[in-house]
Amino acid sequence: MHRPTREDVARKAGVSKTTVTYVLTNRSDVTIPEATRERVRHAATALGYRPHAAAQALASGRTKTLAIAFPIRIGAHYAHVLQSVERLANANGYHLMATTIGHADIQNVEPDLNDLLTSLIDGIILVDVPGAFQPQIQSMLPAAKPIVSIGVFTVGGTDRVVVDLERAAMDAMEHLLASHATRISFFGPGQHDEEELLETFAQQGQLDPRYSAYCRVMHEANLPLELIAGSPGSRRVSMTVLKEHILSEGCPEAIFCMNDEMAVAANRALRELGYNVPNDVLIVGCDGSVEGEYMSPALSTIVQPIDTMCMQAWRLMEARLSSPDAPTRVVNVAAQFVIRCSSVRE
């Protein structure tokens, strides 16, 4: 069976092959009457013509595909980021490919990113690159394709949109202190050395801003740190850890959670142990997930400006694709602490 070609479309529409190429690759920088464009599109549809993706990429220099890469896993917060970027990509005629880097092992970060850089995509959006990943990524810069990094943790030397959590995290901690809670725990990842955190909390940029705000406010209030090592990516693990901590050490008056997923897990664990949120325990999360808003009670949280962040990232990517040698740009956006029922005693 004969597969329709550009020549067939051009013959049917009564135009040149070049015009067909310009129309079907959506070249807006070439002046072609809309009636001609419509005639070409109608001819292509009538013939069942489908442009070959690789050939289109060679002709235009663009694949009209971007990649967005997340560290290790795509949780609830990152799913929201993915949806926001995908809407922007689709609205601008791009396809979006989502993946992770470093999900198997930290040593896989460089090969994972290299696989993306050598694939048929036009650029990469990196989301929340952990400090442990940065050396491998920095060793690959400048990259052959545009990279825009976004989130709380970004990559120096790239166009980036930085989410500032510091002020919102301080607001969250000051809100918990204002409730007269004196035993406030931080529910976050991994094991932490309290003395080390106390020594380094003032060194801006060396700690997660949520840790930094927690340590700073507790230190200034002359209150002891209480760090509970859960799992930001596993509600089941976080519930188990929190229950064991409470049964062993008693229950804190307030819990500042690393993210909303851990806050949801904390709410469930406390309820199963017979505690009431917020009358017995106050809870604050971070990310601003829709799930937290509809939790019972509704979750107080640090809301990240996801749609604004993603829009700015899209603009940086478009600018970089148009001007590959332009100076690197940095855009800062601020998070906001939103008070709901989970941190206000009745």
Image (cartoon, helix red, strand yellow):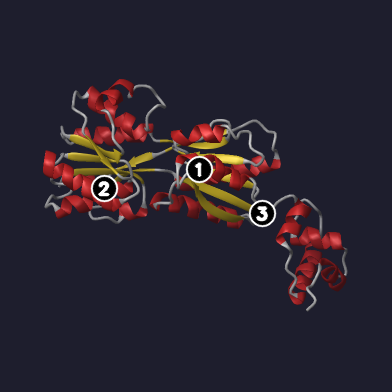
> Looking at this view, is 289 or 1 the one in front?
1
Residue 223 in the image: state x and y as whole percent.
18, 26
The residue singled out by tag 3 in the image is 64
Look at 16% across and 34% down and name the residue there.
Answer: 183
Q: Earlier in the sequence, mark 2 or mark 3?
A: 3
The answer, for residue 261, to whether it is visible in the render is yes
Answer few, some or many: residues within 10 Å of disc 1's Cα (few below 14, many 20 plus, some between 14 and 19).
some
Q: Which residue is mark 1?
A: 108
Name the spot of residue 340 as percent of width and height, x first: 26, 47
- Please state which of the two labelled residues, at mark 2 or mark 3, is closer to the viewer: 2
Nearest-to-viewer mark from 2 and 1: 1
- Numbered mark located on residue 238 in the image: 2
Q: Is residue 58 left or right of residue 92?
A: right
For discs 3 and 1, the disc positioned in front in the rendered view: 1
Quadrant of res 196: top left
In primary-sequence order, the first of circles 3 and 1 is 3
Q: Amino acid at mark 1?
A: Asn
Q: Residue at x 61, y 33 (%)?
A: 141
Q: Residue furthest bottom?
A: 1
Q: Is residue 279 above or below residue 134?
A: below
What percent of the width, then of the height, locates residue 276?
Answer: 14, 50
Q: Nearer the viewer, residue 105 or 122?
A: 105
Kind of residue sitting beneath label 2: Ser
Look at the numbered discs 2 and 3 and tell me whether their residues touch, using CB distance below 8 Å: no
Left or right of 57 in this view: 139: left
Residue type of the residue flagged with mark 3 = Lys
Q: Residue 305 location, x and y as percent?
A: 44, 44
